[in-house]
Amino acid sequence: MAGLLGLSRLIDAINRFIGKQVSWLILFAVLVSAYNAIVRFLGDGLPAYLPIPRASNSLLELQWYLYGTVFLLASAYTLQRNEHIRIDIVSSLFSKRTRDWIDLFCHIFFLLPFVTLIVWLSWPWFQRSFVSGEISANASGLIIWPAKFMVLAGFVLLTAQAVSEIIKRCAVLSGMIDEPNPQHELHPAAEAAIEMEEKRDD
């Protein structure tokens, strides 16, 4: 089990790094979106001599490329942080151990088969696009295969994280490790700030 926990820590470290790094793409996407909106608004009012790109389909497609990349590559980190959507009203009715068993069951029989299937299907889908040099049907559109590669990469990372979560849940249930993502009444940053304030008062 120690070897499996080492694998889990490695997967967690990789997905943590990727999840934090791709978050910067949100800023880039917002800047592209704002630039595209401003250029479209000004339209013919822009001087022709300014060497800046005008609004185009490529800029619009770049926006969803960036948002899609963040969503796909950060999904594994979201699962790792236990920030994915769940029905808390229902899960809060069960004991911690029951919730752990439910998580383990769902990860093994629902999450892992689903993400593995998507990886298996997305590989030839991406490969055909890459080999053919597929380009968007829109005028001045971007090449398509990088977006399709992000789907493949995102689900590969999510598959690895599913394996990591299964390992950790088994270790928690057997008492080998503590809960890696304890439940918080408030956001962890808010709880830390309150704790520091209480220490200062003492």
Image (tube, grey):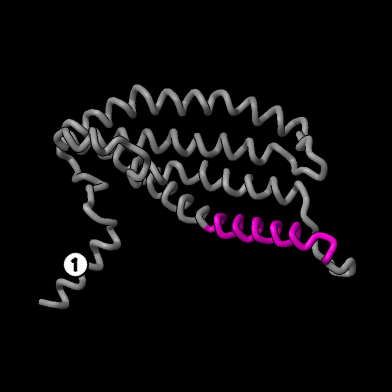
**Image quadrant assignment for residue 52:** bottom right
Q: Residues within 10 Å of mark 1 (few under 14, many from 20)?
A: few
The residue lying at 25 percent from left, 35 percent from top is: 169
The residue lying at 17 percent from left, 34 percent from top is: 93
**Residue linked to disc 1:** 195
Horizontal side, residue 174 vs residue 37: left or right: left
User: Which stretch is magenta?
Assistant: 24-45
User: x, y percentage for residue 90?
Assistant: 23, 33
- Looking at the image, residue 119 lies above or below residue 178: above
The residue lying at 49 percent from left, 23 percent from top is: 117
User: x, y percentage for residue 85?
Assistant: 36, 39
As for residue 12 lying within the magenta part, the answer is no
As for residue 36 lying within the magenta part, the answer is yes
User: x, y percentage for residue 15?
Assistant: 43, 47
**Image quadrant assignment for residue 5:** top left
Residue type at the position of mark 1: Glu
Question: Would you say residue 8 is visible in this rendering?
Answer: yes
The quarter of the rendered structure image containing the N terminus is top left
The residue lying at 89 percent from left, 66 percent from top is: 48
**Image quadrant assignment for residue 6:** top left
Q: Nearer the viewer, residue 182 or 137?
A: 137
